[in-house]
Image (cartoon, helix red, strand yellow):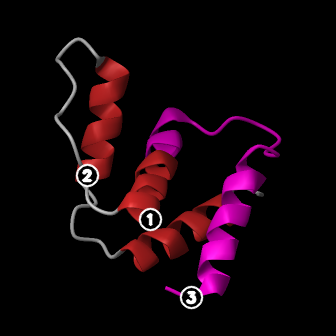
Amino acid sequence: MSDHLQSQFERAYLDLTRLGQRPDNDTLLRIYALYKQGSEGDVQGDKPGFFDFVGTAKYEAWAALKGVPREEAMRDYIELVRSLGG
């Protein structure tokens, strides 16, 4: 992975804090999943319990990206943040 891609990824993470308005929940889940896939790779750990609705949604969003290369997830994350004005 290139240092340039890594620095853009980190920059996009910081840019999220400067968004003018909060993205909708589906977009937030996509942001979360792309960040986790880009920073850690495929989903890890056990799926949260049934009554942990937020945790389950996050886990499932990340799990949906299983097999996506980290570099691709990082590029998609950067592109998504930029499209939101970050």
Left/right of residue 32 with respect to residue 24 in the rendered view = left
Query: Of residues 28 and 6, which is closer to you in this image?
Result: 6
Residue located at (28% from left, 60% from top): 65
Residue located at (78% from left, 45% from top): 19
Determine whether label 1 and label 3 are within 8 Å by CB. Answer: no
Residue located at (21% from left, 40% from top): 45
Calculate the distance from the C-alpha at mark 2 to the C-alpha at mark 1.
Answer: 11 Å
Q: Is residue 18 magenta?
A: yes
Circle count: 3
Magenta part of the chain: 1-29
In the figure, 51 relative to 42: above or below?
above
In the picture of the structure, the residue carrying the numbered disc 3 is: 2
Residue type at mark 2?
Answer: Val
The x, y position of residue 67, in whole percent, is 22, 70
Calculate the distance from the C-alpha at mark 2 to the C-alpha at mark 3.
Answer: 22 Å
Q: Residue furthest top?
A: 51
Dot 2 lies on which element? loop
Residue density around tag 3, few if under 14, some if 14–19, many if 20 or more, within 10 Å: few
Dot 1 lies on which element? helix
In the figure, 28 relative to 73: above or below?
above
The x, y position of residue 14, in whole percent, is 74, 53
Residue density around tag 2, few if under 14, some if 14–19, many if 20 or more, within 10 Å: some
In the picture of the structure, the residue carrying the numbered disc 1 is: 38
Predominant SS of the magenta segment: helix
In the picture of the structure, the residue carrying the numbered disc 2 is: 43
Determine whether label 2 and label 3 are within 8 Å by CB. Answer: no
Residue type at mark 3?
Answer: Ser
The x, y position of residue 60, in whole percent, is 25, 41
Left/right of residue 29 with respect to residue 61 in the rendered view = right
Which of the two labelled residues, at mark 2 and mark 1, occupies the earlier sequence position?
1
Query: Of residues 67 and 20, which is closer to you in this image?
Result: 67
